[in-house]
Amino acid sequence: SAKTKELAPAHPVPKGKPVTYEVIWAEDGDVPTVGSVPTGEAVTMAAGTWMSGGHVPLVAGRKALRLDAAATRPVIFDTGEVPLRMRNAFIAIAHVQPDAKHPPRAVGIGFLCAGKPARMVWGDPSALSDTVGQVIVAGPMPAVGVYTRLEADAMACGVKSGAAISGIQLLQSDGAAWWDHLGARCSSADASSDPLLNEDAWVKTLRNKPALLYAAALPRDIRYLINLGDAQQNADERRLTSAFHRNYIYGPLRGPVELQAHAARRLLAEQVGYEMRLPNTPIAREAAKPRVVHDLPRGRYDRPGEVVQPGTPAFLPPLKAAGTRATRMDLARWLTDPRHPLTARVAVNRWWQALFGSGLVRTPGDFGAQGQPPTHPELLDWLAHDFVSHGWDVKRLLRLLVTSRTYRQGNRVASALLMRDPDNLLLARSARLRLDAEVIRDQALSLAGLLDATIGGPAVRPYQPSGVWETVAFLESDTRFYRADSGAAAHRRSLYTFWKRTAPPPAMTVFDAPSREIACLRRERTNTPLQALALLNDVQQIEAARAFAVRVLNLPGDDAARLRYAFRAATGRAPTGNESSVMVSALAVQRRHFSDVRAAERLLAVGEPTARPERDLPISERAAWAMITSMLLNLDETLCRN
């Protein structure tokens, strides 16, 4: 990238007028393209190095390209997103300074376009004729020790009018030389039809040639907007397309803009490097001079009242400050003070709610006068005191609750008790509730033997319908396109599932998992047909059923023993005689259905292949048992805590 010599009017270019301009592609470190020319001819990059410093001769900018070639090595510099069109004239330009001690035998310039145009050569034509094909002698070898401007006329080399030129090629035979300020001088008889000068011509060229559009190194968003069409673009999208053409395509401005773009990319790379190396966890510190805070009578900020100091309500324990003024650390110690009546009670109530469906205080977000009073205040006090006195041990508290007689009750209830206590405020029976979304998924994976219980590590992306995030993500978002993980990562505990705040995982949203845009103190539980549809058809559930079936088939015994094991594993109890008969009958039906091997293959192709030994199990048998285990995973007893 380098400054461009403007030979044309400033943007915008008047339509219908001839324009001549120069575009510089190589200066200050642009990297040559390595590949093949449109004709299929192989191209290799010379042993060139961009160098800077007082010993480096320059035409412009800060760097020059040093080529030391023991043999002929072509070097390509391409035009970028859109090929240049040769209208009336197209002149490739380059500045070369042969080394005084080891000058090359010949130097030259070629064109990259369809066909095999000749190359312009300065010096001994035989030094380059064997490798580059037809050559045209443009003059003697340039003088050593000084820069000479080389110009190669595309038309003189056989490039036809209207041909698309995708780049220029530097040629050097033996010796060493400095190269700098490489580009082209273009001439357009009509600026309105030149894509490098006119936005409409640029867009039209790309729309008329989809192959060129997708081959161009355009950002995904710009390509999408060009495909969208003018009629479907809003004003902001049209401005975005125009700005991109002005900043990155428009010929006379291209050089300066690319220079700025390179600088921006360097800064971005430095920023990413710092973010990777430096800790980025924000740490709150007290200000050296605390801000003065006033009481605002009736909230009027323009009439501040008396100065106030940090404090707590008088009906709660006093806040003890370590210094002259209370800090946030003092507030944290006050919240966890054993004498504080709220923190432990709120925590205990939340754990009780998670296990019993409702808390002892049924308004978890309001323990005040406007919330509901606790149904068992003495029990809440005792649990809170026990929690604090044992070092805020959550695991101990949960063990205490689930081993209690209250939690282990059955959920059957006499009609008289149901009429007297329909909301189970007296805790005379067990609370029957559907499992949370995360537990449903983890339970299915655990029964299948697929659950990866590894603790810690980065978030993972399990199965998700395609295109879900694209509808809610910004165009430049790095999470716009969802790419599901595979292997063990797809079977991590739901705790490690990656959440997009505005688009939670659909498999969890169906089962009432809340959005994380706001805090949720209590989840609702619904029962909808969509939940049954997800359990029967979701990829994760079908995969779990398939692996569960393989696990059952690998057990010794007959069908009856395997069915009893599968039922007990899913529900926690042995099946009744009627339930066993239903499962035996269903297994027979599924075996008849999956005698069609193609149907079995379609079912078992869902999800990823498991690592379980399935080679000795008939495919039809695996498919039939997969439907039975799917039925068990969909049982009400499997999905609910009874």
Image (cartoon, rainbow, N blue to C red):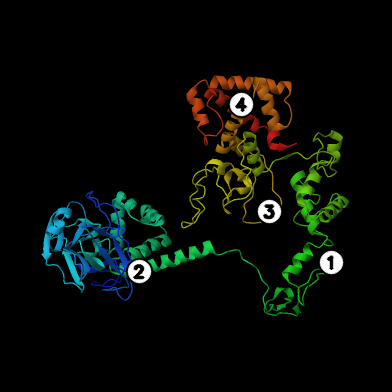
| Closer to viewer: mark 1 or mark 3 | 1
Marks 1 and 3 in Cβ contact (< 8 Å):
no
Element class at badge 3: loop
Query: Tag 1's secondary structure?
Result: loop
Q: Along the polypeptide, which appears first: circle 1 or circle 3?
A: 1
How far apart marks 4 and 2 lie (CA) works out to 66 Å
Closest to the observer: 383 or 368?
Answer: 383
The disc labelled 2 sits on which kind of residue? Leu
Name the quarter where the C terminus is drawn.
top right
Q: Is residue 421 above or below residue 121?
A: above
Residue pushed farthest front?
101
Q: In front of the other: label 2 or label 1?
A: 2
Q: Can residue 104 be seen at all in this image of the molecule?
A: yes
Please tell me which of labels 1 and 4 falls first in the chain. Answer: 1
Measure the C-alpha gap from mark 2 to mark 1.
Answer: 64 Å
Q: Which residue is mark 1?
A: 317
Residue at mark 4: 554
Question: Which of the two labelled residues, at mark 3 and mark 2, occupies the earlier sequence position?
Answer: 2
State the residue position of label 3: 520
Q: Which amino acid, mark 4?
A: Asn
Q: Check disc 2 and report the residue beneath it.
A: 259
Q: Quadrant of residue 98?
A: bottom left
- The amino acid marked with disc number 1 is Pro
- Real-space Cα distance between discs 3 and 2? 50 Å
Amino acid beneath label 3: Cys
Measured in 3D between alpha carbons, the distance from the residue under mark 1 to the one under mark 4, in whole angstroms, is 62 Å
Element assignment for label 4: loop
Report the Cα–Cα distance between label 1 and label 3: 28 Å
Q: How many marks?
A: 4
Give the mark nearest the N terminus, 3 or 4: 3
